[in-house]
Image: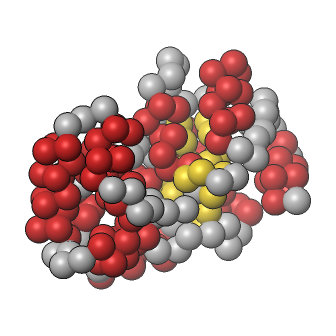
Amino acid sequence: MVRAGLKALLEADPRCTVVGESGHLSDLRVRAAELHPELIVLDIALGPENGLAALPELLSARPQPRIVVLTMHDDPAFAREALGRGAHGYLLKEAAADELIRAIEVVMSGGTYLYPQLGAQMVRQPESPATHLTGREREVLRLLARGHTNAEIAHELYVSLRTVEAHRAGLRTRLGATNRSDLVDAARNLGLLL
């Protein structure tokens, strides 16, 4: 129903042509590669996967699409994560319909759009050390938080056990984590467990 309403809203604007839609990340990847959309309106929760994980891949397409994240997640950490991974806009589903059109106008003209109330929250909250984790550190953190052992992570990421141990030690230091529970909390706050 949400996708149908979103599609109707966009099709009502003469500047927009909806070329496809998807409810799962795997399908989105295929459709984006086939259709080469100029704009992707992306939710964080796409089936069992986190839509933010697909941002680098979607943005590597040529021509590069503009991406607006439209989500219910009003935590500034999600917005930082999305923008840090290359999203051009971040908007909450609770926003008025004309706010989405405004966000699309901004990003399609080369700007970046951040939902105003969320932007105000981000200004008031200092960035955490987790904001600047590398992609590899995020992967290790996600797998640790899901209960994988160091050896399992090394196998999955095709790295040595020592590399995983070094990442784990670095994560504990940077995040101030003293145990696995702290790492799980950090992963959850970064949206890595969606």
For this rendering, which residue is in front, 111 or 126? 126
* Residue located 24% across and 35% down the image: 159
Its colouring scheme is secondary structure
Q: Position of residue 191 (x, y in %)?
A: 46, 63
Q: Please determine whether, in this image, residue 28 is positioned above or below residue 81.
A: above
For this rendering, which residue is in front, 90 or 42? 42
Left or right relative to 56: residue 151 = left
Q: Which quadrant is the N terminus positioned in?
A: bottom right
* Residue located 43% across and 36% down the image: 56
Q: Position of residue 135 (x, y in %)?
A: 30, 45
Q: Please determine whether, in this image, residue 132 is positioned above or below residue 163.
A: below
Q: Please determine whether, in this image, residue 164 is positioned above or below residue 142.
A: above
Say which quarter of the image contains residue 76: bottom left
Number of marks present in the image shown: 0
* Residue located 48% across and 46% down the image: 53
Whether residue 36 appears in this view of the structure is: no
For this rendering, which residue is in front, 88 or 105? 88
Say which quarter of the image contains residue 120: bottom left
Q: Position of residue 36 (x, y in %)?
A: 64, 22
* Residue located 76% across and 47% down the image: 23
Left or right relative to 167: residue 124 = right
Q: Position of residue 146 (x, y in %)?
A: 44, 62
Q: Please determine whether, in this image, residue 134 is positioned above or below residue 31.
A: below
Q: Which quadrant is the C terminus positioned in?
A: bottom right
Whether residue 10 appears in this view of the structure is: yes
Left or right relative to 134: residue 144 = right
